[in-house]
Image: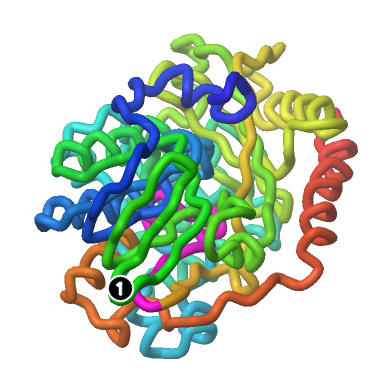
């Protein structure tokens, strides 16, 4: 996108084209204005339109331009924070409500894909959280205990089982989650857009919102080319919230964590049988974590914390080759076909937030690297809330006011430079 091969990489090369859209021009009316064309915004628009509500989606660049079109493509159940910790952080009522809502979110995603015939390479073969060393195994063992206590059929694998599943002897074990899977994220978000349009929603791209004013009981949402008069506004810009957008505090309460991905060329059939033969998506327990999976054509996708810009480009690229060869020596010499990166929005407690920014202006944000399934389901929740089916006191998260993250710029620089420092010396063989 925008002639930048490092923005969406493989996903842009292999996704079906986006549905045809145009810039907003002139003044229109809608029941709801949705700001942001990612998972949450388009899921909200789809579910509202299916209920007969008029919706206008305003996307600053293109559908899936932000994290929705750049991420690794893991369709995970639940959030990064462990179940018992969620209840401690949110309290027993909201904690339990959120756990129940997100318990089987991958099934919601896969059902939407099937219902709307979205061409996005869904694979429902589960995920592997791979343990590095004794401490890593202790971590996944505790996660297994907490999920099993809730009746979730996760399975703790030993080193031998993990080696058979991954094709690597580099792990002491893994936590297999059969609820989860993978997909092509840019193809999925474009599919959501196509489904929303078919249901009657209007989508405008290249239409950054530059203002919003309240007049009596309506909102006037302005772009450079036009405006939308609406009863409700859904803010779904998350980590890619622009500074000129109303309610820029969405961005200010998050710390940007850069994450990059590289891909090999399609592997031979022999290599495919030896690396992730079951088709799972995987990631590990390192502090500067790694993730790996195969795409539909047998490319090995490998990712980690870091930004492919400046000095980071050569450092992360060299590290990725070393790390892949150490995990999978059967690969031999490695050539990368594509590379790209994006930003993950991290919150203070690693949980999403629900904000009411003004009367009838609402939004979820801060997915902390778990945006596909929760973002889809939270979009449905927002639609139900606007339709009056779910009251504010019944939402899965409490209403909170945005708070600026302290030392945000310093922390973001630390994460980017720290990832470079880690990758400069790690996995040298």
Position of residue 423 relative to residue 409, above or below, is above
Q: Position of residue 121 (x, y in %)?
A: 32, 29
Residue drawn at point x = 50 percent, y = 58 percent: 211
Position of residue 297 relative to residue 11, above or below, is above
Q: Is residue 373 magenta?
A: yes
Q: Residue furthest bottom?
A: 92
Residue drawn at point x = 25 percent, y = 72 percent: 385
Position of residue 306 relative to residue 222, above or below, is above
Bounds of the magenta span?
A: 359-375
Q: Nearer the viewer, residue 309 or 361?
A: 361
Q: Position of residue 108 (x, y in %)?
A: 24, 53
**Label 1 SS:** helix
Q: Is residue 152 magenta?
A: no
**Is residue 92 in view?**
yes
- Does residue 1 appear left or right of residue 393 in this picture? right
Residue beneath disc 1: 100
Q: Nearer the viewer, residue 391 or 75?
A: 391
């Amino acid at each position: 996108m925008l002639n930048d091969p490092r923005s969406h990489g493989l996903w842009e090369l292999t996704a079906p084209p986006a549905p045809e859209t145009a810039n907003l021009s002139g003044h229109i009316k809608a029941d709801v204005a949705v700001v942001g064309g990612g998972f949450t915004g388009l899921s909200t628009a789809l579910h509202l339109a299916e209920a007969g509500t008029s919706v206008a989606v305003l996307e600053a660049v293109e559908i899936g331009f932000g994290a929705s079109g750049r991420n690794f493509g893991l369709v995970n159940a639940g959030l990064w924070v462990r179940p018992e910790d969620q209840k401690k952080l949110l309290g027993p009522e909201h904690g339990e409500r959120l756990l129940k809502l997100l318990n089987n979110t991958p099934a919601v995603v896969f059902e939407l894909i099937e219902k709307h015939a979205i061409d996005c390479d869904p694979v429902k073969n589960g995920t592997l959280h791979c343990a590095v060393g004794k401490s890593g195994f202790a971590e996944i063992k505790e996660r297994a205990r907490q999920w099993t206590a809730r009746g979730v059929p996760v399975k703790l694998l030993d080193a031998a089982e993990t080696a058979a599943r991954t094709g690597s002897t580099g792990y002491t074990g893994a936590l297999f989650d059969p609820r989860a899977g993978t997909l092509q994220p840019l193809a999925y978000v474009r599919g959501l857009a196509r489904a929303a349009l078919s249901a009657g929603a209007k989508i405008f791209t290249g239409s950054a919102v530059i203002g919003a004013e309240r007049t009596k009981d309506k909102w006037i949402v302005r772009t450079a080319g036009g405006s939308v008069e609406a009863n409700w506004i859904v803010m779904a810009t998350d980590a890619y919230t622009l500074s000129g957008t109303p309610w820029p505090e969405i961005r200010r309460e998050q710390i940007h964590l850069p994450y990059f991905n590289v891909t090999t060329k399609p592997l031979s059939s022999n290599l495919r049988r030896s690396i992730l033969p079951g088709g799972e998506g995987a990631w590990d327990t390192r502090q500067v974590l790694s993730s790996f999976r195969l795409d539909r054509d047998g490319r090995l996708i490998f990712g980690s914390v870091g930004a492919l810009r400046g000095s980071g480009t050569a450092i992360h690229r060299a590290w990725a080759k070393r790390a892949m060869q150490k995990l999978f020596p059967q690969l031999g010499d490695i050539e990368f076909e594509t590379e790209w990166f994006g930003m993950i929005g991290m919150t203070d407690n690693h949980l999403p937030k629900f904000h009411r920014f003004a009367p009838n202006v609402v939004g979820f944000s801060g997915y902390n690297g778990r945006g596909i399934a929760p973002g889809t389901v939270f979009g449905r929740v927002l639609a139900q809330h606007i339709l009056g089916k779910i009251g504010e006191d019944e939402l899965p998260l409490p209403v909170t006011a945005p708070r600026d993250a302290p030392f945000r710029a310093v922390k973001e620089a630390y994460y980017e430079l720290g990832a470079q420092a880690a990758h400069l010396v790690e996995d040298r063989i």
